[in-house]
Amino acid sequence: MPRRNFIGLGAAGLASLGGWTWAAPSRGKPAAKNVLVVFEQGGMSHIDTWDPKPDAAAEHRSPFKPISTNVPGIHVSELLKQTARHMDKLTLVRCMTQPLPGVANSHPLGAQYIYSGEPPGGAVEMPDMSAVIAMLMGSKASHLPSSIMVPGTNEMASATRAGFLPPAYQVFKAGGNLADPQWSVPNLGLHGVDERRFRNRRDLLSSLDVGLTGAAQAKGAGAMRSFMERAADMLTNPATRSAFDLETEPAKVRERYGTGLRGQSYLMGRKLIESGVRFVTVDCREPMNTWRDGKQVKFPGGSNMNWDHHDDIYSNSHTNIKGGGAGAGRYGIHTWPMMGSLDKALSALIDDLHQRGLLEETLLCVVTEFGRTPKINKRKGRDHWTHAFSFAFAGAGVPGGQVVGSTDKDGGYITSSEAYTVDDYAATIYEKLGIDREKPIDTPDGRPIYLAKNGNPIPALF
Amino acid sequence: MIQGALRLLLIATLAMGLGLGADEIERLEVYPSTVTLASKRSQAQLVVTGYLANGETRDLTHDVEVTTEDAQVANVLNGVVLPIGNGDTRLNVRFDSQTVKVPTSVTHQAEPDPICFNTETQAALTKQGCNAGSCHGSPDGKAGFSLSLFAFDSEHDLISLVRDGANRRVNVLDPDASLMLKKPLLRIPHVGGKKLRPTDAAYQVLRQWIFEGAKPDPPESALCTNIEVYPSPHRILSAPHLKQQIRVVAQFDDGSSRDVTPLATYGTSNKNVATITPAGLVKGRERGQAAITVRYLQYLESIYFTIVQPVPGFEWEDQPEHNYVDQLVNAKLRQLKYLPAETCQDSTFVRRVYLDLTGLLPTAVQAVQFSNDQSPQKRDQLIDHLLETESHARFWALKTADLMRVNPKLLPDGRAELLFDWIRDNYRENLAHDRFAYQILTASGDSNRAAPANYFCTTKSVEELTEMTSQIFMGSRIGCAKCHNHPFENWTQDDYYSISAVFARVEQEGAMVQVSGAGEKMHPRTGQVMKPWGHDVSPDIDEVSDRRIGFANWLIAEQNPFFARVEVNRIWSHLFGRGIVDPVDDFRSSNPPSNVELLNALADDLKQQGFDRRHIIRTICRSQTYQRATNTTLFNADDSELCSHMPLRLLTAEQLQDAIGYVTSTLPDASARQGDADALRGQFEQEIDLFPHSQADWEKAFLEEAATAQLGQTSWFSIGPFRQGNYEETRKQDFVPAMSTMDTTLQHHGKSWQSQPDWNDDEQIDFSGSNTAYYVHRSLQASQAMEVMLHLKGDDGVTIWINGEHVFEQSKSFLDQQIPLLLYKGSNDLLMKVTNGGGAFYVHYNIPDKDGTTHIPDIVTRSAENRTMEESQLLQGIRITARPDLVALQRKIAKLMDRDAFATQRPYPEQTDFLKAFGQPERESPCACERASEPTLDQALQMLNGQEVQRRIEQGVATLSKQEPAEFIDQLYLAAFSRHPREKERATAEAYLVKSANQEEAMKDLMWAIINTQEFMFQH
C-alpha cells in the first residue's frame, strides 16, 4: 500500500491501519538527475491547450479545434500542432487541482507555491524546491550555479525563496532578454574589461591581498574566499561562458526553437541541463519591445504578456477592453508571442532533449499556477480557475503517450478518480530525484521539515 | 523479578572515583536531606556532593557507599532509594571517613498507586520520542498515528491511543499485544525504529497503564504545577571529574511531589561539551559550556554546565582591564583556559569603531588625524565623539527600523520616513530605551502624525503583532506556541493567546490606530477568554483601559527577565557580530548565554543608568575586549563565542556600498556635510532672529499687497496609468514621489509627463482604466502668501500634495469637497493622484476665488499677543518663503542633511541588486535573521564583476585621474584600510601604475584590486 496521508481522503479507517501494515514506502524508481521546469506564468488556459473541450456550450467553447497527436486517441488543441507530434514522449496530467483557491488564485502566492511545492503562509516559509535540491544533491558542474532561472526577470520571479536555508542556495537568475544579440548574463559575462585584463587584475589582487590575521580561522572569511575563487573561475572558465553562449548553437537549432525570448529561453534551458545544472526553471514572457531573428521588434500595445487572459483571450493582437480585469496588454492566446512561440519552442525542446539523450535523466515539467474558467466572461476573457487544469511531463522514466485524469465536458471539474495538487507535483520531483522524503531537514530552530509533506508522487509518472 | 533482584542488594556500592583523594573533600552533602516515599511506585534519586577546600564541588553520587539501617523499609540501588515497607529508617551515606545520615520515611505501601495518564504516560511518550515533531507529534502524525507535540493535548492523545487504530494500539486484556508496545520494541516492524526497551522506565509506565485498563485520569487527579531540578542553576565540572547526577522532582497542585528523574526528558545544547543519559547522569566532554535541558510535560528547566579540561602549556597572561566588561570576559576566558588577544593597532581600531558606530569608514583625513593624535585618551574621545554624530543616530536607527518593518510598501505616504525619523530622533537625543518601548507599545492616533503608531500598521493580525512584539522586545520566538506549546521553552499556548489578548482591542484602519473598549482573544483549543498578559502587574487597570499599558508596564519593569537583557544583547551583537545569547531573538533557557555574568551585568548597568543605551555602547567600546586584535594563537583560535579575540565580520550590505563609495570618492564625506549643515543652520537662525525688528513693516506691506493678491496657474501635466495589483495597492503605492519642486522631465516607471494644455478649470477631466492611477501636476503662482479654497469633485481615490507636503487624501467614494490650500508667495507645486476603483474616473478642479481668503490677513491684523502659537509660526513661514535667500539657504541645508545617497543612512532599504546580494533585508520580518550574513556566490560576482563596483570605479577614477601615483596609492590605502601602504604594497602598486600604458585604466585596476581584498570586505 502506498504511504499516503489517508486522513486527507477521508478514509479514517485505513488511516489508523496504515501504521501497522509494514510497507516500505513504494517509491518510484529515482530516474532523474536533473529537473527542467517550464513555468508558464499567469494561469494558462487548459481548455485552449492540453485539455480541449469540443463539446462545451458553443458560447463558451474555444474557437480552436482539437487535433490528433502522434498517439492515437490523444487530442490536444490545434494551438499545440507541433508539440502534438511529440505526444509519444509526454504524459498529460489533466487532473491538476487546487484545493486552496485563496492561495492559488493569487499570482505571487501561486508562483511561490509552484517554486516551493507547499502553499505559502504556513508556520515556516519554505525554500524553493530548487534550493532544497541544490543543498541535498549539490552540483555536477562546479563552474555553474546548481540552480538557475532563465531569465528570472518577471515580477513573479520575486516569489523565489531560500527560506530557512543559507542564502547560498538561492536560485541564480540569468537575467536580460536572451533574444537580444548582445545578451550576456549580467555579472557573469565580464563587462568593461576583457579576459586578459581581468587576469591582470586578479594577479594584482593576489599580490596585494595579503589576507588578514585570524582569517584562516574565520568561517565567513574562508567561505567568501572560496566563493571569490569560484566566481572568478566562472568569469573566465570557457565552459561557463559556452554554457551561456547561445552563439555556440547552430543557427538551425536556434531557429528551430524560435528566435524570440521564449524560444531562446527554452533553448538555454536545454543548454544548461546539458552543462550539468541540477535544476533549471524557464520562466519567460515576450516583452513589448524585444528581438526576433536578431532584430528589434515590437508587439504594439503588449505589456506583461503572460497567460492572465481576463479579457479578449481570442484577440488577434493585444487586449484592451476597458475594465478588463488584469488590464490591457495581454496578447490573444493564439498569437505568436503566446501559443505561437510556445508551441514552437516546446516541440523543439522535447525533440532536442530526446535527440540528445537528455530525456533519460532529465525530468521535464510544463506547469502553470492554475487554469482558466470554462465560461467566457463579459469581457471576452477567462478568469482564474483552480478546480481543474493541466500539467505536462516528460523524461526521467515518465511514460510517453499517456493521459492521466479527465475533466467534464466544459473542462470545469475533474471527473477522474485521480486528482493531483501542486504538492503532488513537488513530491513527484523529489521522488524522481531519489530524495528521501521520510527524512526531515531541520530549520535552524530545530523544527523538522518534511519535503512536500502534503503531497504524494503521481504514480502514473513512474 | 526486579523486586527480587533488589532484595539481594541491600548495599549499593560503586567503584571509587579516579584518584579521588579523600583529604580533598571537606564536606559531604546529600540531596535531599530527608527522603519521603509516600506511594508504592515512588522513588528518590540521591545526589551526593563533596565540597573541596577551594569551594569547588564534586559529584560523589556514584562513588559513595549507602546502607539502610532498616532493610525492611527501604533499599538503595545506584543512588536511587526504593520503598520496601511502611516505616521510618535512616540511610548512611559514607564517603571515606565522612558519613551523612538521611532520615527516610516510607508510607502508603499497602495502597494502590495507579499510573496517571496526564503526568506519567504522557511523560513516558515524550521521553521515548513518540510525540516528537519528526515522529507522531508532527501536525499530521506519522503513518496514521497522531499525537500532540510533546503531549500538549492529552484529550487528543488519549483518543488516538485508545480509540483510533482499530483498538489495536492498546490491548487491555493482553498488554504485551498492544501495538504501542510492540512497534517501538520492534517486535513488529516500525518505521521509526527501536524506541523502547523493556528495561526503560517508560516501558514500565506504558505497560502498567495499559494493564490497569488504559484509562483516562479520574477528574480530581492532581495536576503538575512545576518542576524542581537539582543541582541548579549552574555547575562546573573539571577533568577528570566530569560526571554529575541530576534529580528532577515534579510538584502537584494537591501539595504532593514525585521524583520523576527517570521519566523526565533530557537534552543538551552542545553535545560536544556535555551529554546526559536517560537516567539523568551528565557527562562532560570537551571544554566549553552547555545547557542541559530537562523537560517534564510542559515544564522546561535548564542547568548550565561548564566543562573545564586541562590545556597543556596554558598559562594565563593578564591583559589590561578597562571596566567590568573586561573583568567578566577575562574571568570566563581564564576559567576555560583561553588567552585574550592583545589590543589592536590604532589603524584597526579607528576603522572598526567608525564602521560599528556610524556605518561608514573613516575618511583618509579622519584616519590620519586619529593616528597623529597623541592623547592617551584618544580612543575614548573618538568613541564619545562618534556617539554624538548624525551618522551614528541614523545607522543605529537603521538597525532598529530593520526589525519594525519600516518600509514604504507597508507604510506609504511618507509614514516609513516618519517612523524612521522618530527612531533616529530617539537615538540622536539618546532617549531612554524603556520610554522608547512604552511609547511605541501604547501609541495610537493618526499615524501620519503620531510616528510610533505606525508600529501597529505593519502587521495584518493580532497574532503577527504578538509575535513581532515578543521577538523585538522579549527576544522570544513564541510563534511556535500559536499552535502548540513551544518545544524548547516554557512558552505555552496559553501564554501566546494571553499576550494576543493585550492587542485584541487595537483597531487599525488605514493610518488610524485606535483602542476600542471591547474585543477578546479566545484560546483556540479550549475557547476560553484569555486574560491579557501583564494585567496582574497593573491591577489598577480596569476593563475599559488600554490593555497595552499593563503589558508595557510589565515589560519595562525592573524585574522583567527579558527587556534589559535583550537590548544589551542586541547592542553586543552589533559590536561583535554575535550576541552573548545567539541568535539575539531566541532567548530561552535551552539556548544559554555564552557569559551569563556579563549579560546580567550589562543589563543591570542599563537599568541603573535609566535605560541609557548610549552608555552601554560606550562602555562596551571602551573595553579592551572590544579593542582586541583579530590575531589568534594556539590558545584561542578555536574560541568563537567568549571574545578572546575580535572576529572578522563581512561588512553589511549598506556598510560595503558606502565603503566602496568612499574609496572611489563617489560619496561625499558625511561628517563634513554635517558640519556644513550646522554652519548654515546657524546662519539661517541668525536671520530669523532679526525678524522681530522688521515685523511691523512686513505686516504693513503684507496687508497692502493682500488687497491686490492674485493667483495664476500653469497648465496641467499628467502621467500614467500606473497599476500595482488591486485598487487598494495601487492607491497606496507611490509611483511618482511628491517633491517640493516637481520636475516634469523625469520619467517614472517608464512613463513620461504629458502636457495637457486643453484641460480647463471647472470642467471634468476624464481618465480610463480600472484599478489604475494617474498623477496630475500644475504650478500655482501666488503674488503673495494666501490660503485658497479648492473645490474638487472626483471619483474614488484622490491624494493631494502641495510643495511636496501631503495635504489631503480620501480613499474611496464620490467626492465633492472644499479643500483649503496654503500657498506661499511665488511658485507652489501641486501634485494630485487619482485612483480608480471602477466605473467613472475623473476629477473636476476649480478655485473660484483666486485672490485668496481673508484668513491670513486676519491673523496679521491681530496683534502679536492675540495670535496662537500656530498662527505665529504660520506667519514666520510665510515671511521665510517670501525671502528667496532664506529659501535657498533652507534648500542647501536640506540637501546637506539629505543622506539618501548613503545606504547606511537612508530611512528605508533601497533594495538594489547589490544590496540584496549582500543581504539587505526587505524589512518584512521582525527577525534579525532577515538580514542574511553568510557569503554567497552572488556577492563574489558583485565584487569581481558587478555593475555597482564598476560604475563607481569609473566615476571615481574620472575625478581622481589628476593625482600623482604616489598620492593616489596613499589616499586609496588610507580610505580603504585607514592605514598607509606598507613598503612592499607601495612598490607593487607603483610598479603596476608605472608600467601601464594607460594610467587611468591602471588606476581602475588598482582600485578594483583594493576593493576586492579581504582587508576591505571585512571588518577586523
Image (spheres, helix red, strand yellow):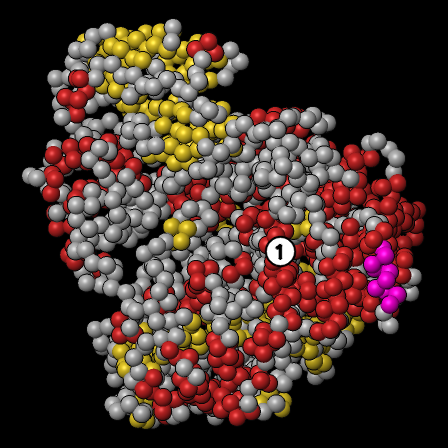
Where does the image place residue B178, in percent across and percent down from the top left?
A: 13, 43
Identified at 75% across, 71% down, the residue is: A197
Q: Residue at x 22, y 37 (%)?
A: B197
Seen in the picture, residue A397 relative to A83 is either above or below; the reply is above
Please indicate, yes or no, whether residue A23 appears anywhere in the rendered image: yes
Farthest-out residue, left: B173
At horizontal 58% and vertical 29% (from top left) the residue drawn is B312
Assign a secondary structure to mark 1. Answer: helix
In x, y percent, where is residue A7? 23, 58
Question: What amino acid does circle 1 point to?
Answer: Met
In-front residue for pair B509/A22: A22
Verify whether residue B443 appears in magenta. Answer: no
Q: Viewed as shown, does residue A47 lie left or right of B614? A: left
Q: Which stretch appears magenta?
A: B986-995
Chain letter of the residue carrying label 1 = A
State which quarter of the image contains the N terminus of chain A. bottom left
Left or right: B845 with respect to B1003?
A: left
Compared to residue B619, the image places residue B482 above or below, namely: below
Q: Which residue is mark 1?
A: A224
Closer to the camera, B252 or A130? Answer: A130
Q: Is residue B243 above or below residue B886?
A: above
Q: Is residue A73 left or right of residue B958?
A: left
Q: Quadrant of residue A377?
A: bottom left
Residue B901 is at least partly visible in this image:
no
Query: Magenta stretch mostly in which secondary structure?
Result: helix
Q: Residue at x 78, y 34 (%)?
A: B380
Q: Is residue B990 magenta?
A: yes
- Residue B13 x/y as whole percent: 29, 16
Residue A382 in percent (x, y) is at 39, 81
Quadrant hosting residue A109: bottom left
Rate crowding at label 1 as few (under 14), some (14 to 19) or many (20 or more) other CA atoms within 10 Å: many
Viewer-nearest residue: B72 or B584: B72
